Image (tube, rainbow, N blue to C red):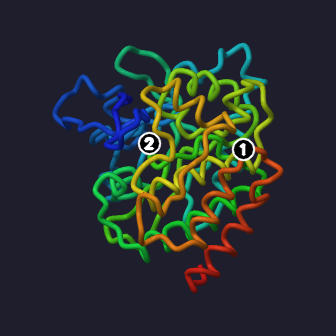
């Protein structure tokens, strides 16, 4: 997923980090040819912390995903004692939920093509497409979308109960397997120690701003918590069910103003998709209340309400 800006098909100008096709034969796209015993096959994505590659351990016939951290995220050796990343990866490796991408506990250091020492994270490889692709194709039934949102709600609730705020929820950070049986959350913020780098990344990404909560857009020093994730999740949920973002601004600045301003009222999702029932309208719009104290206060509450109207238990 090369980081490019792409206009959505709605009348507004919501910009997001979009996935672009990679040419697997273009060696210039590869920062490394291998990481430890893993041979790099091709680039498959990019997120807030770096680029992601498909890789294979040929001796064990094991396919994995490897995230090569952006060099800005690395820490000078003289400051390694203050480096919290190792502890964060240990926390991530202990997470065990069917809707969360699994991390290995180790951080691998590997020289890249320019002889720079890069830090690499080993992750579960998910063969499928991100949620943004399915939103664009409109190839999911209402029941499938309900099931996906139930599973994502459960996964995010699991993260929150383990003290982790995602900080970058958007359709591109949810991956569905090809058979649509599983959905995975990835590229989550592991702890507060990664917040400063993520803030810089978000400033550079107009697309990510389209999914930020108003408290973050209006105050770059805002303290983010579970309710901030809930607002971003609500925007993603809105876009999945309605087929488009709730804001219709002509450019990124207008979108940002609409997200923050109480004068702009989000249309009901059913305005764009008549299949949406009133109860689902209510759930989605409650996640999008600009005052964090008036939103859902936990993903558990959202999960219970979604289960109630879908009749399913995840």
Q: Which badge, 2 or 1, comes first in the chain's sequence?
A: 2
Query: Which residue appears at 59% of the width and 41% of the height?
Result: 168
Locate residue 68, reporting x and y percent.
46, 33
- Is any part of residue 296 visible from this angle? yes
Q: How crowded is the residue under tag 2: few (<14 C-alpha within 10 Å), some, or many (20+)? A: many
How many numbered marks, from 0 up?
A: 2
Please, which residue is most extreme toward the bottom here? Answer: 311
Q: How crowded is the residue under tag 1: few (<14 C-alpha within 10 Å), some, or many (20+)? A: some
Quarter of the figure that contains the C terminus:
bottom right
Query: Which residue appears at 46% of the width and 38% of the height?
Result: 248
Q: Is residue 151 left or right of residue 305?
A: left
- Is any part of residue 101 visible from this angle? no
Please, which residue is most extreme toward the left here? Answer: 25
Task: Tell me the tag on residue 198.
Answer: none
Query: Which residue appears at 56% of the width and 52% of the height?
Result: 103
Regarding mark 2 in the picture, which secondary structure is present there? strand
Q: Is residue 278 above or below residue 220?
A: below
**Which residue position holds label 1?**
290
Q: Are marks 2 and 1 in contact (CB under 8 Å)?
A: no
Query: Which residue appears at 67% of the width and 48% of the height?
Result: 229
Locate residue 160, reporting x and y percent.
74, 56
Quarter of the figure that contains the N terminus:
top left
Seen from the viewer's position, the closer of residues 243 and 58 is: 243
Q: Is label 2 or label 1 in front?
A: 1
Q: Is residue 109 above or below residue 44?
A: above
- Quarter occupied by residue 115: top left
**Which residue position holds label 2?**
66
Locate residue 25, reporting x and y percent.
16, 34
Q: Is residue 15 left or right of residue 224?
A: left
- Quarter occupied by residue 243: bottom left
Seen from the viewer's position, the closer of residues 147 and 263 is: 263
Regarding mark 1 in the picture, which secondary structure is present there? loop
């Amino acid at each position: 997923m090369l980081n490019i800006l792409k206009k959505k098909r709605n009348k507004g100008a919501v910009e997001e980090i979009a996935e672009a096709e990679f040419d697997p034969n273009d060696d210039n796209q590869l920062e490394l040819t291998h990481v430890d015993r893993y041979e790099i096959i091709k680039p498959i994505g990019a997120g807030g912390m770096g680029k992601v590659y498909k890789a294979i351990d040929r001796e064990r016939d094991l396919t994995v995903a490897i995230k090569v951290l952006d060099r800005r995220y690395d820490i000078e050796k003289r400051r390694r004692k203050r480096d919290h990343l190792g502890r964060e990866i240990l926390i991530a490796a202990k997470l065990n939920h069917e809707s969360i991408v699994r991390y290995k506990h180790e951080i691998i250091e590997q020289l890249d093509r320019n002889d720079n020492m890069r830090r690499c994270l080993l992750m579960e490889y998910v063969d499928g497409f991100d949620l943004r692709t399915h939103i664009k194709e409109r190839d999911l039934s209402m029941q499938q979308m309900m099931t996906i949102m139930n599973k994502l709600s459960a996964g995010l609730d699991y993260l929150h109960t383990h003290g982790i705020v995602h900080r970058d929820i958007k359709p591109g950070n949810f991956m569905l397997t090809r058979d649509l049986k599983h959905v995975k959350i990835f590229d989550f913020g592991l702890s507060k120690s990664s917040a400063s780098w993520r803030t810089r990344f978000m400033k550079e990404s107009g697309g990510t701003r389209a999914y930020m909560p108003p408290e973050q857009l209006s105050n770059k020093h805002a303290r983010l918590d579970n309710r901030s994730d809930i607002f971003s999740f609500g925007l993603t949920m809105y876009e999945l069910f309605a087929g488009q973002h709730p804001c219709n601004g002509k450019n990124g600045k207008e979108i940002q103003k609409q997200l923050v301003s109480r004068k702009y009222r989000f249309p009901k999702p059913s305005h764009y998709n008549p299949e949406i029932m009133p109860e689902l309208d209510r759930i989605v719009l409650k996640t999008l209340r600009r005052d964090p104290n008036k939103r859902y206060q936990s993903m558990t509450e959202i999960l219970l309400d979604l289960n109630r109207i879908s009749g399913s238990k995840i």
